[in-house]
């Protein structure tokens, strides 16, 4: 992959992580949040790729597959980000409580 394509893929992972985070928060709790977020965002990415194929159709197939994979990865990373933020929030609350004691 060229540097230009690599930068675009990293950018898409970041963007899809945001989409996954918003989808996770919108749909609420589930037993398998990472699977659900990866599936939702991967399907969203697949829809984008399908529309691009119909309208433009110049991207090689391996790049389209890679784009859908980046979407699913972004959805999965969204759950990691959510867990990290929740963990940091719990630590902050525990530190505040311990300071008051």
Image: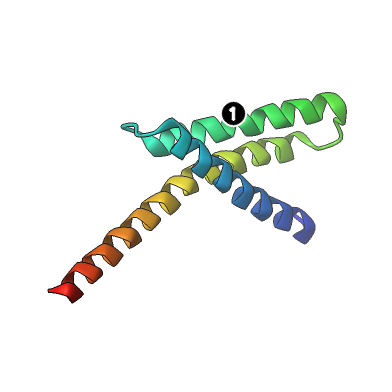
Which residue is label 1 attached to? 43
For this orientation, the residue located farthest to the left is 101
- Residue drawn at the location 79% of the way across and 58% of the way down: 4
- Residue drawn at the location 34% of the way across and 54% of the way down: 86
Q: Quadrant of the N terminus?
A: bottom right
Based on the displayed image, in which of its 4 quarters is residue 53 positioned?
top right
Based on the displayed image, in which of its 4 quarters is residue 54 positioned?
top right
Give the number of marks.
1
Q: Quick one: 99 or 8, which is closer to the camera?
A: 99
For this orientation, the residue located farthest to the front is 100
Q: Quadrant of the C terminus?
A: bottom left
Query: Percent x, y for residue 89?
Result: 33, 59
Q: Colour mode? A: rainbow
Query: Percent x, y for residue 47?
Result: 68, 27
Query: Percent x, y for residue 9?
Result: 68, 51
Is 62 displayed left or right of 55 in the figure?
left
Query: Percent x, y for residue 98?
Result: 17, 72
Is 11 displayed left or right of 20 in the figure?
right
Based on the displayed image, in which of its 4 quarters is residue 61 positioned?
top right
Reply above or below: 8 against 36. Answer: below
Crowd rating for badge 1 (residues with CA inside 10 Å; few <14, some 14–19, many 20+): some
Secondary structure under tag 1 reads helix
Is 15 displayed left or right of 84 in the figure?
right
Is 69 displayed left or right of 59 in the figure?
left
- Residue drawn at the location 65% of the way across and 55% of the way down: 10
- Residue drawn at the location 61% of the way across and 49% of the way down: 13
Reply above or below: 11 against 43. Answer: below
């Amino acid at each position: 992959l060229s540097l230009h394509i690599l930068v675009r893929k990293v950018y898409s992972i970041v963007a899809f992580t945001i989409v996954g985070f918003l989808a996770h928060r919108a749909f609420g709790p589930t037993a398998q949040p990472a699977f659900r977020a990866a599936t939702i965002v991967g399907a969203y990415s697949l829809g984008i790729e399908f529309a691009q194929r119909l309208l433009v159709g110049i991207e090689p197939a391996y790049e389209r597959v890679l784009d859908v994979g980046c979407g699913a990865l972004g959805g999965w990373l969204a759950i990691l980000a959510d867990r990290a933020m929740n963990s940091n929030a719990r630590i902050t609350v525990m530190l505040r409580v311990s300071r008051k004691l």
